[in-house]
Amino acid sequence: MVQFSRAAQLDAAFAALADATRRGVLEQLGRGDASITELAERFDMTLTGMKKHVGVLEDAGLVATAKVGRVRTCRLGPRQLDEVTSWIDRYRRLWSARFDELDQVIEDMKQKERAQR
Amino acid sequence: MKNETKVERKSPREVVITRTFNAPARIVFEAWTKADVMRRWWVPASSGLTLLSCEMDVRTGGGYRFVFAAEPEPMAFFGRYLEVVPCSRLVWTNDESGDAGQRSTLTLEEHGDTTRIVLHELYPSADALEAGKGAYDGMAETFAQLDALLPASAA
């Protein structure tokens, strides 16, 4: 496997998750493994279209695939999304990070206002 | 001490985020409506992510567009402002996921020297929320992982 830097991998994961279909595929694989054909049917897409989406998810490490006979089976990849916490905890972490940063920005704004008086 | 960020799933279609800031509502509102301020906190410095551009036309019917560096191509978050009431209320759409995007309503309540904000996100369906949270997972994970990366890269 090609070794990307961790930052590049994160960029890839971030980009992979920007698409609603790919998020749906992850959601689906969270419930159980599925073949590309099954995923294509489920999301009402062509096989080629689904292969592309799975490829993007696979490059990001979010999905792993294995070919057994003529069927390529997809499962969640090594970069599991919910291995530690539930999504709501992760979401809280994201907003906490933003708002803690905003606290700083607000302090700067308040100081500027005071200085202008 | 930092103020607590509270996140609750109010219903199958709704997520509500609440937080108090130690500033009057007009300052908090400015932080959500001026591009040069918003870009300082929307993507925390610790995330290591690069915001390529941040355009906001904050008026009813106006649009916004944030573009992040990503591979294979930059990623955009965009939508329209449905309601703009200075210092108290901001409503916008999130259109990057097409019809599955949520409608975000931000309300600000001033209490003495502090302002409590409530960010209400309403999805068109429970399925859309379930699918959308995948993106939050990724973003939060990105922040967490980059936090973990920072000491190593500084050494």
Image (spheres, coloured by chain):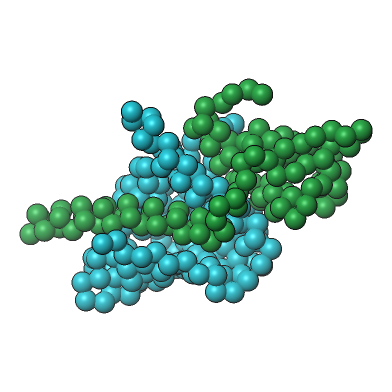
* Residue at (32% x, 68% y) in the render: B20
Q: Tell which residue pokes out farthest to the top in this image.
A: A2
Viewer-proximal residue, B93 or B139? B139
Q: Is residue B81 above or below residue B108?
A: above
- Which of the pair A67/A36 is nearer the observer? A67
**Residue in the picture at 53% in, 37% down:** A10
User: Does residue B74 appear in this view?
Assistant: no
Q: Position of residue A102 (x, y in %)?
A: 31, 55
Residue A31 in the figure: left or right of residue B89: right
Q: Residue furthest bottom?
A: B111
Q: Where the N terminus of chain B falls, by quadrant?
A: bottom left
Residue at image position (23%, 65%) is B23
| Quadrant of res A54 | top right
Point out the residue furthest to the right here.
A69
The colour one sees for chain B in the rendered image is cyan
On the picture, is A104 further left or further right than B102?
Answer: left
Compared with B113, B1 (above or below) is: above
Q: Is residue A90 visible?
A: yes
Q: Residue at x 36, y 35 (%)?
A: B151
Give the camera-side residue of A33 and B82: A33
Residue B55 percent location from the top left of the image: 42, 47
From what the image shows, is residue B111 above or below residue B73? below
> In the rendered view, would you say A35 is above or below B89?
above
Percent x, y of residue B124: 64, 67
Residue A70 in which image quadrant: top right
- Count every numbered label the image shows and give the total: 0
Chain letter matching colour green: A
Image location of residue B123, percent across then percent down: 60, 66
Can you say which quadrant of the picture contains the C terminus of chain B? Answer: top left
